[in-house]
Amino acid sequence: MAPKSSELLDTELADLPPALRWRKWMARVEAVLFASSEPVGREVLARVVGRDCALNLLIEDIDAELVGRPYEIARVSGGWQFRTRPQHAAAIRTARGEEDTTRDLTQNEALVLTIIAYMQPVTRGAISRLTGREVSRDLIARLHRQALIARGPRSPEPGAPYTYVTTPGFLVQFGLETLRDLPDLEALEDAGLLKPAADIALDLPIVGEDTD
């Protein structure tokens, strides 16, 4: 049986001077990120560098060398990913012959997405109770089509409705590494994304709890 490729890779590079070893590690990590269309986690990158390699510092050094380039390394969805800088988006769409189909979320969509992000998994009925208005299936479908939310487990409440959760695409689109990076609700109110009257922080129903 042929040996696995990982067994052939000298990750420690102990025979190299420290500076050259660091450059080799940088090249390996950059190659792995370049080859991946999804965020790459720490455990994957750790396979190609030495045990004592400080990955955060290594990636900072790679990113520093990309200053002035049309792309950068972003830390999103629990890993790192190459990302084109926003100012070049129009050029890429034009080269591909694509129309700009992006649009800002409506106020209702932003509110529903925020509630899902903070309360997940949460049912459509719970969102409706929280906002004081019916949340339509069409609104949920629009967020789903944009790959911002997905179905979660069924709720234990009567009828076992589906719950909704955010997706890795949500983290990528909003530049978050994990959900722990979500701003607090007061910051959202200050930014005008939520109205204080929504009282989200004070009126969070528990999924499955009798709210009658």
Image (cartoon, rainbow, N blue to C red):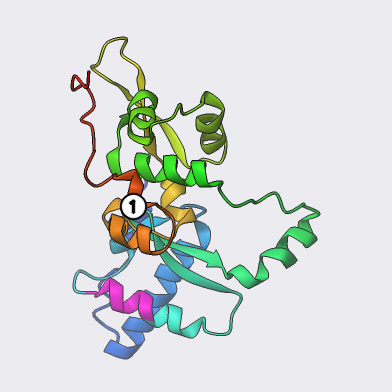
Whole-percent x and y of residue 132? 38, 31
- Report the residue that reaches farthest toward the top: 159
Question: Foreground residue, 170 or 119?
Answer: 119
Question: Of helix, strand and loop, which mostly describes the magenta segment?
Answer: helix
What residue is drawn where x is 58% and y is 71%? 85
Q: Quadrant of residue 116?
A: top left
Q: Which residues are magenta?
A: 53-60
**The C terminus - image quarter:** top left
User: Is 88 displayed left or right of 65 in the figure?
Assistant: right
Question: Foreground residue, 39 or 23?
Answer: 39
**The N terminus - image quarter:** top left
Q: Quadrant of residue 126?
A: top left
- Report the residue that reaches farthest toward the front: 197
Provide the secondary structure element on which disc 1 rests.
Answer: helix
| Res 1 seen here | no
Read off the residue under disc 1.
196
